[in-house]
Each structure stands twice: as C-alpha cells, then as structure tokens.
Image (spheres, rainbow, N blue to C red):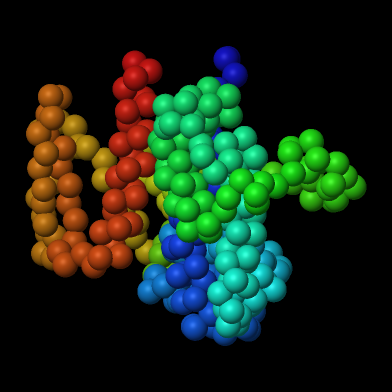
Amino acid sequence: MTEKPKKERSPSFPFIALPEAVKRLEAFEQTFGRHPTPAAKAGLAWGLKDGSSQAAQLLAALKAFGFVEYSGTAKDRTAYLTDRARTYLRAQQQHIKDGVLREAALEPKQFQKFWAIWGADRPPDPICLDELILKHAFTDSAANTFLKVYDNTIEYSGLSDADAGPSDQQDEESREGDGNDEIDTSPSPKFSEGALINWESGGQVQWAAPRRVTSIDQHEDGSFYYKVQGPPEDIDAGGWVPEAEAIAGDVLPAKRSGFAPPPPVAPTGPAADPEPQAGQRKAVFPVSEGDVVFLFPEGISLDGLEELEDYLAVFLKKEKRLAAEQ
C-alpha cells in the first residue's frame, strides 16, 4: 500500500484585510463590550448564526491582527478584547489610532515576513506570486488572495519603509526562549480520520449512532469538512459534515432522527431519478455522463443557501480530484 500523499495546504493568514477587521472589531465591541464572550456566540456581532464557520474565521482574523485573545478550550472557549483593541477603540487622537493600525498590520506572521522582504514598494504581482507559490508553499488561489489582503492591509495602515520590522534572524533572536516559538498557528481539524462523530444541526443531534470519518477536506476559507460513512444499512451513502456541526460520537440524540447527507450525490441509472415530495423542489443538470438531479426544500433561507454553497464547493473539489486520478 502506497503512503497517502500529504494534503496541499498554504501558510495561515487572515482571510480579511485590516480595514474589514477594524469594522468587525467595532461591531464586536458594540455588541459585547469589554466582557469575555463565548467564542461560539461571536457571530451575533456580525449577524451570523451561532457556531458558523464564517464567524469562526472572522474571529480568527481578529486574533491574527492582535485584537482578540482566547481563554479556555473547546466549548468553554471565550474571546476577549486585547489592550491593543481597547486602545484603538478608546483613543481620541488619530496618531494613536494610526500607531495601533501599523502594529496590527504586521502582527500576522506572514505579513511581517513579506513586509521585511518587499517593503513599501513590493515587486509586481507575477514576481510575488512566483515567490509565494514556488518558494513558500502557497497554493495558486491562496497566493492571489494573500496579495489582495496584504496590499489592502498595508495601504490602510499607512506603513512606510521607516516602519520596517526586524529581519527574520533578528526576530528569532529577540524571541529566543519564548515558549510560543514552535507553535503552529495554522488551523487544524478537530477530529482525525477514523474518528467517530455525530452531526448536530439546529441544536438537534441528528444521528442515532455515530459515523466514522473517512476523509477530511479544507475549504478555501480555512474551514474543515468531514466525509463520513453512511448508516449500517447503506455504509456507502455517506456525506460531508462541516466542522462547526461535528460533535463527538458519544453524544447521541434522545430519539432517532433522519439525515440526508450533504452534499447532494448524483443519482445513477433510470430508477434513481427521484421525484420531489411535498415541500420539495427538483433541479436537473445534464452532463456528459447523464443527468445530475438535486432535491431540495422550498424556501431555503439565505443562511441555508450559503451552507449549501459550501457543501457543493467541497463536493465539486473532491469529485474533480477523483476524476483527475482516473
């Protein structure tokens, strides 16, 4: 058996730029004040549902810029404003706010790293993209996103060459002995392949028995999805579960509930063409090998459509990979 190739993964960086992070910080402070806040509730500040992957990514971006910190772990984790965030929000003089923004812009490790290389007048996009992809293990899409977020952050902060930080070597020497030197800040999945998990949606545990994780995929926004086996009577009928809705397998529902695993799977054969039931709609997409048929509930909310979009993106990415291997 050949060893499974390692998943291609880019270095971690905030997925929003500094000006957007400042807006999210102000909304967070207006909603929660200075009080420590359950991390799972942070999305309330931005009109997002509890525990959504987008809310988690926004909170992670605020942490990357040094505006929030975490306390506790797992379900007990809370988020609170840092001294940097409070200084920015309370300062009346613009030069104080500007100083905070310059510090925050170079807080993310990758921004600090490439600011030291490129300075205020970075090289043209093709040169930078080659450096990110060929030398620093960025994927093509992540490299393009990085440049946009990086440029927007540097411009908004007003950094100039006079603000250049220490070189990589000096930075390592200044932090020698710091217990955080070797910590990998890139996100990692909560569960591993082979783990037994359950699915919690709308506050309800969905499966009467846990299901085994067979593979893990990471979306472009950094969120993870778990592919699981189907129920014992149809073990191949698996689906994808977003990490925000995945819970430990020893948590079971009070009573059995149904589950149609996302994302929709293309049916095969004439007999597999389902008809919509009451409250459902049907969409048919013809491809070279036949029709792809989706059944979906009527009146899907905007949040539901966003979730479906995430599921389909992961599904298509996986299928493209499988097709390329054939």
Q: Nearer the viewer, residue 6 or 88?
A: 88
| Res 170 → quadrant | top right
Q: From this viewpoint, is residue 255 visible?
A: no
Q: Nearer the viewer, residue 198 or 133?
A: 133
Q: Residue at x 58, y 63 (%)?
A: 101
Q: Nearer the viewer, residue 89 or 264?
A: 89
Image vertical order of residue 116 relative to residue 45, above or below: above
Left or right, 270 with reference to 178: left
Q: Nearer the viewer, residue 40 or 173?
A: 173
Q: Residue at x 38, y 74 (%)?
A: 47
- x and y percentages locating residue 180 in the rendered image: 79, 50
Image vertical order of residue 326 relative to residue 209, above or below: above
- x and y percentages locating residue 172 in the rendered image: 81, 41
* Quadrant (top left/top right/bottom left/bottom right) for the C terminus: top left
* Quadrant (top left/top right/bottom left/bottom right) for the N terminus: top right
- x and y percentages locating residue 314 in the rendered image: 36, 42
Residue positioned most to the front: 162
Q: Residue at x 31, y 22 (%)?
A: 323
Q: Residue at x 26, y 45 (%)?
A: 264
Q: From this viewpoint, is residue 83 visible?
A: yes
- x and y percentages locating residue 217 in the rendered image: 47, 40
